[in-house]
Amino acid sequence: MFNQFARYEEAFADWRRDGYPGVKPETYNYIDFLSDPADDQSPREGVLWPHQWEALLRVIYCYEVLGQTEIGGDGLLLNIVTGGGKTAIMAAVIAWLRIAHSVQKFVLLCPNLIVRDRLEEDFEGGKVFKDRDLLPDWAHVRAQDFALTTLGGGKAAGWASLLSADVILGNIHQFYQSNLSGQSNLSALMNGPDFALFNDEAHNSPADEYYATLRRMREKVALRVDTTATPDRADGKAPDSDMVYEYGVGDALADALIKTPVVYQPDIRTVQLTYTDARTGESRRVEEIDWDEVDRRGLSATQWVTDDKPMRQQMAIALRRLDEQERRAKGRYQPILFVVAVCKADAEKAAQTLNKFFKVKTLLVYEDSDEKDRQKARELGKEQKSAAPYKAVVSVLMLREGWDVPEVGVILLLRKFSSKVYGQQVIGRGLRRVRTKGIGHEEPQICAVVDHPKLEHQWLWNIFGSKVRQNVLIDQLFDETEDLPEPPLKQELLNPRNIVEVPDPDPRLIGEGEFDIGEIEGPPEPLRNWRETLAALQYNPTVAEITKVNIRAVIGKQLAGDRWTTIHGAPDLPEGDEAAAVEITDAMLRDAIKEHLLQIAEDLTVEAGYASGFKSEVYSALIAHVRDKFLNGASLGLAESADLAFAWRLLPQVRQKVEATPGLIAGIIKYDDQ
């Protein structure tokens, strides 16, 4: 996403140097209040971090000097890395708008309950204004003047509370026009005074109803400020606001503001496969193969982290990293292992394995978990002094954006990411530094990410600036004091006048030369007889399970700064490796089959060149296909246990065969109603 403010950087620098000409007197006084007495170009210590100060000044410059007709007609976007303190920036903007522009009402929108809970904790009782000393005495504005109303979850609602509140916090869905409650909330908002709008986690806003709600609010919005750490979505869409400031992972690493991510992957020598009849569970044969031969066996990527043996080995690697993090913590806090699964069945299996097999106290959190478990997830890092603190938490993408537990020191990936947004959000959960008594700003901190090479996440590690240096000392423990390199140099824009905008090509202009690129093969024709084609697919009931993995070593790659790799010894599993059975209930299997088919439908829809919104047609076709092929015609809710297990084991084949049939997905979408 292009930084729209780049063209103004030189004029902005002159404006700062010249003493902020053109702003209101109250704005000048507020900037002076936040400034360092010894350096009026920098923030006062303990109030705002330097990048927060830069973001605030750009918002002020856009609003008071440039004006919304020049930039930000649909809002100003701040692209701030996870852990970069977006909430403090919002609070500073709120304080400035109240003091300098007499804005009395502020609306904070967020996409989910996790983000809402975090913002509520920060703004309840004016906490963030007090913590950051954002309100000068001369302004006669107090922290309690920002009375908070939180919508949902048993909180206040209705016209009276919306009209009387100074700060309104709610999920965007609570203002949607597709439900009566949303209609009422939006009506109350639109019948009150003008307000400032803060759209947190703004990468969600391209969703149709989200976007429509923002457009409906526009006529009452004095200023809209969007915040996100991931503005560029995997679907190619981005928020409609103008990005005016970027502070990314590289910047935060250079400023030692976040942890340094280190990725650990097993180096595998051989693999044992057991071939089993998916219908009867009978083992047919066992085969041991070299790692180089694995791809020819057609194993799915997730088998490497969800089959019993490899899952336990990945967990052993993660728990070794957790032990190291506990030694670094020196009793000052309890490091947390964060496990990310793809569905409820895998999450249940992971939680049971950690609890029963490894004897590690683990919390399991779903999207539909009750408030008690959600509260536990928010307070994981505060439990170190309890008799038996949680050391691990397992989630199905629930704990993503907005879940901020700095004590997360190890992340274990039990799923493959296709979405650039989701991948960055999950890794972001481990980047926030622990800031507690006895930990100085200069103390190095790392986040250990346990990955698997078959998940093919190199694209994700490249986003974080993956660098590698060979260093072959077996079982050498990573020492962050000695081994962490100096932070990378921070990149700064020195000559904004040299920025050249690349215009869109003029369709009237035709190039003089022609290139022979041969014939370009177009997409396959949609199959009109897709029902017959789908029904004709045949499946092999023999499935391969990974029952033994011989790991040569574990390779740790540091993702920023100098180029190095640390090689550790292979992990040992506890005694009685084969004894710990994991119970998978029918309910878990039903949910898992549904969730997995939904994911398959979305992936194949996008791969076929269609918008993800068409996945519902594909899902309907696939669920009917599974019912006919594996469930004896029964629905998911009524299917027998054995049939559910059979269907679950064959789902990887369903994806492979549907994906390999040209025109099948396109036919389902185009001819679904014929």
Image: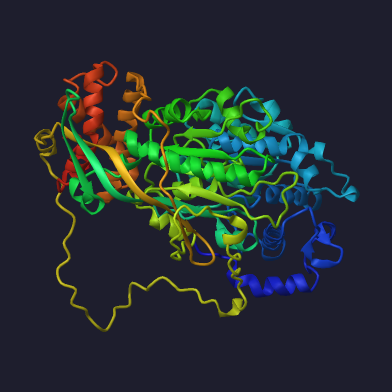
Q: Nearer the viewer, residue 125 or 669?
A: 125
Question: Where residue 516 appears, x then y in whole percent?
Answer: 18, 77
Question: Where residue 298 appears, x then y in whole percent?
Answer: 20, 45
Q: Residue furthest bottom?
A: 512
Q: Determine whether, in the image, residue 624 is placed left or right of residue 80.
A: left
Residue at (12%, 42%) from the top-left corner?
Answer: 528
Q: Determine whether, in the image, residue 639 is placed left or right of residue 342.
A: left
Number of numbered discs visible in the structure rendering: 0
Question: Where residue 614 appears, x then y in whole percent?
Answer: 30, 41
Residue at (44%, 34%) from the top-left corner?
Answer: 396
Rendered image coloring scheme: rainbow
Q: Determine whether, in the image, residue 64 is placed left or right of residue 585.
A: right
Q: Determine whether, in the image, residue 477 is placed left or right of residue 627.
A: right
Question: Where residue 144 appears, x then y in whole percent?
Answer: 81, 36
Q: Is there any visible trace of residue 205 in the rendered image?
A: no
Q: Nearer the viewer, residue 13 or 217?
A: 13
When asked about the image quadrant of residue 351, the answer is top left
Q: Is residue 466 above or below residue 114?
A: below
Quadrant in the picture for the C terminus = top left
Q: Is residue 68 above or below residue 425?
A: below
Q: Is residue 123 above or below residue 506?
A: above
Q: Is there any visible trace of residue 68 in the rendered image?
A: yes
Residue at (43%, 28%) from the top-left corner?
Answer: 357
Residue at (26%, 51%) from the top-left corner?
Answer: 291
When asked about the image quadrant of residue 189, the answer is top right
Q: Nearer the viewer, residue 330 or 460?
A: 330
